[in-house]
Amino acid sequence: MGATFANPGGNELDAGIGFYVNPKFHMDDNLLLGIKYERTAIGAANDDFLDVSAINCYASTIDYYVSTSNLRPFAGVDIGIYELGSISKTIMSNTTEIELGSKFGIAPKIGVSFGHLDLTLQYNMIFDQNERFNDFNHTSIKLGFHLGGGEN
Protein backbone atom coordinates (compact mmCIF):
# COMPACT_ATOMS: atom_id res chain seq x y z
CA MET A 1 0.00 0.00 0.00
CA GLY A 2 1.15 3.50 -0.60
CA ALA A 3 0.72 6.91 -2.18
CA THR A 4 0.98 7.98 -5.81
CA PHE A 5 1.64 11.19 -7.74
CA ALA A 6 0.17 11.24 -11.27
CA ASN A 7 1.24 13.34 -14.25
CA PRO A 8 -1.26 13.10 -17.17
CA GLY A 9 0.09 13.16 -20.70
CA GLY A 10 -2.46 15.48 -22.33
CA ASN A 11 -3.25 19.18 -22.26
CA GLU A 12 -6.60 19.14 -20.41
CA LEU A 13 -5.46 17.72 -17.04
CA ASP A 14 -2.71 19.02 -14.77
CA ALA A 15 -1.68 16.55 -12.03
CA GLY A 16 -3.06 14.20 -9.43
CA ILE A 17 -2.52 12.32 -6.21
CA GLY A 18 -3.85 9.04 -4.94
CA PHE A 19 -3.35 5.83 -3.02
CA TYR A 20 -3.17 2.12 -3.78
CA VAL A 21 -3.53 -1.25 -2.07
CA ASN A 22 -1.77 -4.16 -3.79
CA PRO A 23 -1.77 -7.54 -1.97
CA LYS A 24 0.66 -9.96 -3.64
CA PHE A 25 1.44 -13.67 -3.45
CA HIS A 26 5.04 -14.90 -3.78
CA MET A 27 5.13 -17.61 -6.45
CA ASP A 28 8.86 -17.92 -5.68
CA ASP A 29 11.63 -15.55 -4.49
CA ASN A 30 11.48 -13.50 -7.72
CA LEU A 31 7.92 -13.74 -9.08
CA LEU A 32 4.92 -12.09 -7.37
CA LEU A 33 1.28 -12.15 -8.50
CA GLY A 34 -1.33 -9.87 -7.01
CA ILE A 35 -4.41 -7.71 -7.28
CA LYS A 36 -4.51 -3.92 -7.06
CA TYR A 37 -7.02 -1.24 -6.19
CA GLU A 38 -5.85 2.29 -6.94
CA ARG A 39 -7.70 5.60 -6.68
CA THR A 40 -6.21 8.71 -8.25
CA ALA A 41 -7.75 12.17 -8.25
CA ILE A 42 -6.59 14.15 -11.30
CA GLY A 43 -7.44 17.82 -11.67
CA ALA A 44 -7.50 20.65 -14.14
CA ALA A 45 -7.65 24.36 -13.47
CA ASN A 46 -7.53 27.67 -15.25
CA ASP A 47 -8.93 31.15 -14.57
CA ASP A 48 -12.51 30.05 -15.36
CA PHE A 49 -12.91 26.67 -13.69
CA LEU A 50 -11.54 23.93 -11.46
CA ASP A 51 -12.38 20.28 -12.09
CA VAL A 52 -11.26 17.08 -10.40
CA SER A 53 -11.93 13.61 -11.77
CA ALA A 54 -11.27 10.38 -9.89
CA ILE A 55 -9.88 7.29 -11.59
CA ASN A 56 -10.43 3.91 -9.95
CA CYS A 57 -8.28 1.02 -11.14
CA TYR A 58 -8.94 -2.69 -10.48
CA ALA A 59 -6.07 -4.78 -11.84
CA SER A 60 -4.15 -8.04 -11.78
CA THR A 61 -0.43 -7.51 -11.18
CA ILE A 62 2.74 -9.42 -11.98
CA ASP A 63 6.16 -8.35 -10.72
CA TYR A 64 9.53 -9.96 -11.40
CA TYR A 65 12.32 -9.14 -8.94
CA VAL A 66 15.82 -9.28 -10.42
CA SER A 67 17.59 -10.24 -7.19
CA THR A 68 16.89 -11.61 -3.74
CA SER A 69 19.11 -9.15 -1.85
CA ASN A 70 17.82 -6.36 0.40
CA LEU A 71 17.92 -3.93 -2.60
CA ARG A 72 15.62 -5.54 -5.19
CA PRO A 73 15.03 -3.96 -8.63
CA PHE A 74 11.87 -5.18 -10.34
CA ALA A 75 9.80 -4.86 -13.49
CA GLY A 76 6.17 -5.75 -14.01
CA VAL A 77 2.80 -4.96 -15.48
CA ASP A 78 -0.73 -4.34 -14.19
CA ILE A 79 -3.68 -5.32 -16.38
CA GLY A 80 -7.23 -4.30 -15.57
CA ILE A 81 -10.19 -1.94 -15.64
CA TYR A 82 -10.03 1.83 -15.16
CA GLU A 83 -13.22 3.61 -14.08
CA LEU A 84 -12.77 7.15 -15.42
CA GLY A 85 -15.78 8.73 -13.75
CA SER A 86 -16.88 12.01 -15.31
CA ILE A 87 -15.47 15.36 -16.29
CA SER A 88 -17.04 18.81 -16.41
CA LYS A 89 -16.42 21.10 -19.35
CA THR A 90 -17.30 24.79 -19.05
CA ILE A 91 -17.71 26.83 -22.22
CA MET A 92 -19.00 30.40 -21.94
CA SER A 93 -20.55 29.83 -18.48
CA ASN A 94 -22.33 26.62 -19.59
CA THR A 95 -21.14 23.50 -17.76
CA THR A 96 -21.59 20.04 -19.26
CA GLU A 97 -20.97 16.84 -17.29
CA ILE A 98 -19.68 13.98 -19.45
CA GLU A 99 -19.63 10.38 -18.15
CA LEU A 100 -16.46 8.65 -19.36
CA GLY A 101 -17.18 5.06 -18.24
CA SER A 102 -14.93 2.06 -17.61
CA LYS A 103 -12.03 1.20 -19.92
CA PHE A 104 -9.44 -1.57 -20.24
CA GLY A 105 -5.83 -0.62 -19.58
CA ILE A 106 -2.32 -1.85 -18.94
CA ALA A 107 0.41 -0.29 -16.84
CA PRO A 108 4.05 -1.37 -17.28
CA LYS A 109 6.29 -0.49 -14.35
CA ILE A 110 9.83 -0.54 -13.05
CA GLY A 111 10.91 -0.03 -9.51
CA VAL A 112 13.08 -0.93 -6.59
CA SER A 113 12.34 -2.39 -3.17
CA PHE A 114 14.63 -1.69 -0.26
CA GLY A 115 13.64 -3.78 2.71
CA HIS A 116 9.90 -3.17 2.99
CA LEU A 117 9.89 0.17 1.11
CA ASP A 118 8.93 0.34 -2.61
CA LEU A 119 9.59 3.08 -5.17
CA THR A 120 7.86 2.55 -8.54
CA LEU A 121 7.63 4.40 -11.87
CA GLN A 122 4.56 3.35 -13.86
CA TYR A 123 2.84 4.39 -17.09
CA ASN A 124 -0.94 3.83 -17.18
CA MET A 125 -2.23 3.28 -20.73
CA ILE A 126 -6.02 3.43 -20.85
CA PHE A 127 -7.55 2.26 -24.12
CA ASP A 128 -10.68 3.37 -25.99
CA GLN A 129 -11.03 6.76 -24.31
CA ASN A 130 -13.43 9.41 -25.49
CA GLU A 131 -11.77 11.19 -28.43
CA ARG A 132 -12.35 14.66 -26.95
CA PHE A 133 -11.28 13.69 -23.41
CA ASN A 134 -8.38 11.28 -23.85
CA ASP A 135 -5.91 12.73 -21.35
CA PHE A 136 -6.25 10.05 -18.69
CA ASN A 137 -3.11 8.13 -19.72
CA HIS A 138 -0.62 9.09 -17.05
CA THR A 139 2.78 8.46 -15.55
CA SER A 140 2.77 7.81 -11.83
CA ILE A 141 5.47 7.75 -9.20
CA LYS A 142 4.58 5.54 -6.25
CA LEU A 143 6.02 5.28 -2.78
CA GLY A 144 4.75 2.45 -0.66
CA PHE A 145 5.53 -0.24 1.83
CA HIS A 146 4.69 -3.89 2.13
CA LEU A 147 3.85 -6.05 5.10
CA GLY A 148 5.01 -9.61 5.59
CA GLY A 149 7.23 -11.54 3.22
CA GLY A 150 10.20 -11.90 5.59
CA GLU A 151 13.27 -9.65 5.47
CA ASN A 152 12.78 -8.59 1.83
Image (cartoon, rainbow, N blue to C red):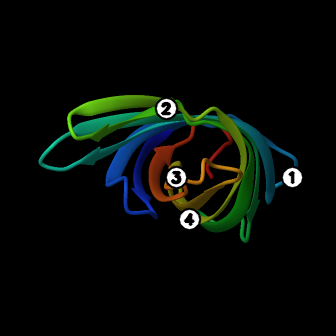
Crowding at dot 1, Cα within 10 Å, few <14 / some 14-19 / many 20+, comes out as few
Picture mark count: 4
Nearest the camera: 72 or 90?
Answer: 90
Mark with earlier residue (2, 1)? 1
- Check disc 1 and report the residue beneath it: 28
- Check disc 4 and report the residue beneath it: 112
Q: Secondary structure at mark 2?
A: strand
Q: Secondary structure at mark 3?
A: loop
Q: Quadrant of residue 52?
A: top left
Residue at image position (20%, 39%) is: 49
Mark toward the viewer: 1 or 3? 3
Q: Amino acid at mark 2?
A: Ile
Residue at image position (32%, 55%) is: 14
Residue at image position (23%, 38%) is: 50
Report whether 62 appears left or right of 27: left
Mark with earlier residue (1, 3)? 1
Mark with earlier residue (2, 4)? 2
Q: Secondary structure at mark 1?
A: loop
Q: Amino acid at mark 4?
A: Val
Q: Secondary structure at mark 4?
A: strand
In contact (CB < 8 Å): disc 2 and disc 4: no
x and y percentages locating residue 70 in the rendered image: 58, 63
Report whether 72 appears left or right of 63: left
x and y percentages locating residue 83 in the rendered image: 61, 33
Mark toward the viewer: 2 or 4? 2
Mark with earlier residue (1, 4)? 1
x and y percentages locating residue 105 in the rendered image: 71, 50
- Check disc 2 and report the residue beneath it: 98
Q: Amino acid at mark 3?
A: Arg
- Check disc 3 and report the residue beneath it: 132
